[in-house]
């Protein structure tokens, strides 16, 4: 069956799922070999390649010249896995018992696995498989060939095969935008690296102990053997011309964004943010803010989903680079979330200033500042903010104190408009205390980062503090003019009404007038003094003469004891 679409097979994913599900999670090679045998037989039946009669020897059925069915590739992959699992089973049994015959057998099994893997490469080229599948199959073949040469102790050939496979997996891990495929490639690299170290040691190339030394060693030993590999990877990159590899630098750190959709959304969000920064007037600023926030919100949702996918892939497949990949994604998500909430705060601040200039309702301003404080609390909960960047913690603390001061002043203006000057002045004092706290925090660190979208300096805090003081004095002056000089608002002490006796406490007298504030009973009731129970002390015990012996104490005495035997 001819097809214009090339064959595509996820070789690493298929092998990893089968190995983990059927025995290799617990190093049970026998169970995995039996599964591969059953799978090969089942695939032969489905593809109609099985012999109808086992008693008569017939010619092996040939494969079709062209097909788009990936099960033909699956047949060869599981045949390789069956031979490799049998070799590992024999090697595991030989480790517990001394037997050279088993070594001969497992080397033969590895030869068969390498030969079938070579046939798999030829089949992929015959069926016009895509470049990605061809490279994965080639890396799989080089790995099996490396295991064969390793057991035969031909270190140079084994080293070349392992380096070839590792280079392919390393290229895929650095270019793929799929978290699961990247984890699979890194896991395959972790399995190959110990063999490369041992081969290099046997060839007197020096011991390799760290991942950095391993990468340098691989670069030195590659030579010209992988000259055609660059051409194939360039073909893959040519097929993915729409993919954008974006470099992100934020807060003295840099990483690459491999996910195509996330890179595109970030590019759109950054473009809209630049247009927003250039606009200094209030015209169309709301529309620009809404557009920018929409882009940042979409990027935040996608970054959160990519981070969750990476966590799921890491839980399934663990490698030495899983922690770094997860940390980079957390860093990207923190950057996106920080920009989203910062732009939201800037929009709310712009709206609050516009409402105050138009003499709008103070309640609307308070609502906007509530949203700002909520966004700041969400920014504090970001993982990268709470774990590594100490500077941003101080920045958020300053912003929190500053915007709390602004909220207190907005609420104070609301109470002032309701002619409740004591509450208004008390809130003004609280706003002043927040300003002092913000200035104290500003003096404890080096200042805001150049990458900070929200920044406050000492001059701005001092200016706002003087504005708070002026607002408080205006409220006091307005209250004095309205109520006269005799009445002065008391904000230091809470005004207390004079205690009045309840009517129940003085029933003999009749009040001249009864108002709504007159109390019938005391709530809560008054406590009356109650005399406590006296203590009785046995003072006469010191003057009683007790018998000197136990016999005298037990001897009965008295008239009743003579007749009835008791009494004293």
Image (tube, helix red, strand yellow):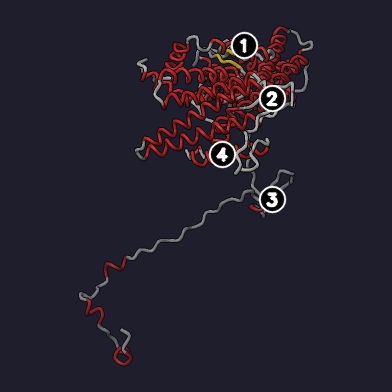
Q: Which residue is mark 2?
A: 65
Q: Which residue is mark 1?
A: 234
Q: Which residue is mark 3?
A: 520
Q: Secondary structure at mark 4?
A: helix
Q: Is residue 434 visible?
A: no
Mark earlier in primary sequence (3, 1): 1
- Which one is closest to the eye, mark 4 or mark 2? 2
Q: CA distance from mark 3 to mark 1?
A: 94 Å
Q: Residues within 10 Å of mark 2 (few under 14, many from 20)?
A: few
Q: Is residue 74 visible?
A: yes
| Viewer-side residue, 13 vs 47 | 47
241 over 141 or under it: above or below: above
Q: Which residue is mark 4?
A: 37
Mark earlier in primary sequence (4, 2): 4
- Residue pictured at 25% horizontal, 78% vertical: 553
Mark earlier in primary sequence (2, 1): 2
- Is 132 on the left or on the right of 285, as rendered? left
| Viewer-side residue, 75 vs 376 | 75
361 over 42 or under it: above or below: above
Mark earlier in primary sequence (3, 4): 4
Q: Quadrant of the C terminus?
A: bottom left
Assess whether mark 1 and mark 4 are in contact (beta carbons under 8 angstroms).
no
Residue 228: percent from left, percent from top: 57, 11
């Amino acid at each position: 069956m001819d097809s214009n679409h090339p064959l595509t097979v996820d070789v690493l994913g298929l092998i990893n799922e089968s190995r983990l599900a059927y025995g290799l999670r617990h190093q049970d090679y026998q169970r995995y070999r039996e599964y591969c045998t059953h799978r090969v037989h089942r695939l032969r039946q489905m593809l109609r390649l099985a012999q109808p009669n086992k008693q008569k020897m017939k010619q092996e059925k040939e494969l079709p010249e062209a097909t788009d069915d990936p099960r033909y590739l699956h047949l060869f992959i599981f045949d390789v896995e069956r031979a490799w699992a049998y070799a590992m089973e024999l090697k595991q049994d030989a480790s517990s018992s001394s037997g050279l015959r088993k070594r001969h057998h497992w080397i033969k099994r590895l030869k068969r696995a390498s030969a079938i893997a070579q046939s798999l490469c030829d089949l992929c080229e015959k069926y016009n498989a895509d470049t990605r599948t061809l490279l994965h199959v080639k890396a799989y073949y080089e790995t099996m060939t490396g295991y064969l040469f390793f057991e035969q102790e031909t270190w140079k050939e084994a080293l070349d095969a392992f380096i070839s496979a590792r280079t392919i997996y390393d290229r895929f891990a650095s270019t793929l935008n799929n978290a699961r495929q990247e984890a699979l490639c890194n896991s395959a690299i972790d399995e190959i690296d110990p063999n490369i170290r041992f081969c290099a040691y046997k060839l007197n190339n020096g011991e390799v102990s760290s991942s950095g030394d391993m990468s340098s060693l691989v670069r030195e030993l590659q030579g010209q053997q992988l000259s055609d590999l660059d051409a194939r990877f360039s073909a893959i990159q040519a097929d993915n011309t729409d993919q954008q590899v974006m470099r992100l630098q934020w807060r003295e750190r840099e990483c690459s964004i491999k996910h195509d959709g996330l890179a595109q959304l970030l590019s759109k969000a950054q473009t809209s943010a630049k247009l927003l920064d250039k606009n200094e007037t209030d015209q169309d600023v709301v529309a620009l803010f809404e557009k920018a926030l929409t882009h940042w919100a979409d990027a935040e949702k996608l970054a959160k989903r990519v981070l969750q996918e990476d966590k799921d892939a890491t839980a399934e497949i663990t490698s030495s680079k899983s922690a770094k990949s997860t940390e980079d994604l957390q860093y990207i998500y923190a950057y996106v979330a920080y920009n989203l909430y910062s732009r939201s705060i800037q929009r709310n601040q712009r709206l609050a200033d516009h409402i105050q200039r138009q003499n709008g309702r103070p309640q609307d301003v308070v609502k906007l500042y509530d949203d700002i404080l909520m966004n700041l609390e969400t920014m504090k909960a970001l993982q990268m903010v709470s774990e590594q960047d100490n500077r941003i913690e101080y920045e958020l603390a300053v912003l929190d104190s500053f915007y709390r001061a602004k909220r207190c002043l907005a609420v104070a203006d609301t109470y002032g408009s309701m002619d409740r000057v004591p509450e208004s002045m008390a809130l003004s004092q609280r706003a002043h205390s927040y300003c002092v706290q913000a200035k104290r925090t500003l003096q404890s660190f080096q200042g805001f980062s150049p990458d900070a979208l929200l920044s406050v300096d000492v001059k701005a805090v001092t200016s706002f503090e003087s504005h708070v003081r002026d607002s408080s004095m205006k409220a006091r002056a307005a209250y004095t003019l309205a109520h006269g000089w005799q009445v002065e608002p008391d904000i230091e002490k809470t005004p207390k009404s004079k205690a009045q006796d309840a009517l129940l406490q003085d029933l003999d007298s009749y009040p001249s007038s009864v108002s709504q504030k007159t109390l019938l009973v005391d709530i809560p009731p008054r406590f009356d003094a109650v005399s406590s129970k006296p203590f009785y002390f046995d003072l006469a015990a010191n003057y009683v003469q007790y018998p000197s012996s136990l016999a005298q104490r037990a001897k009965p005495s008295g008239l009743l004891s003579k007749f009835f035997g008791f009494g004293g």
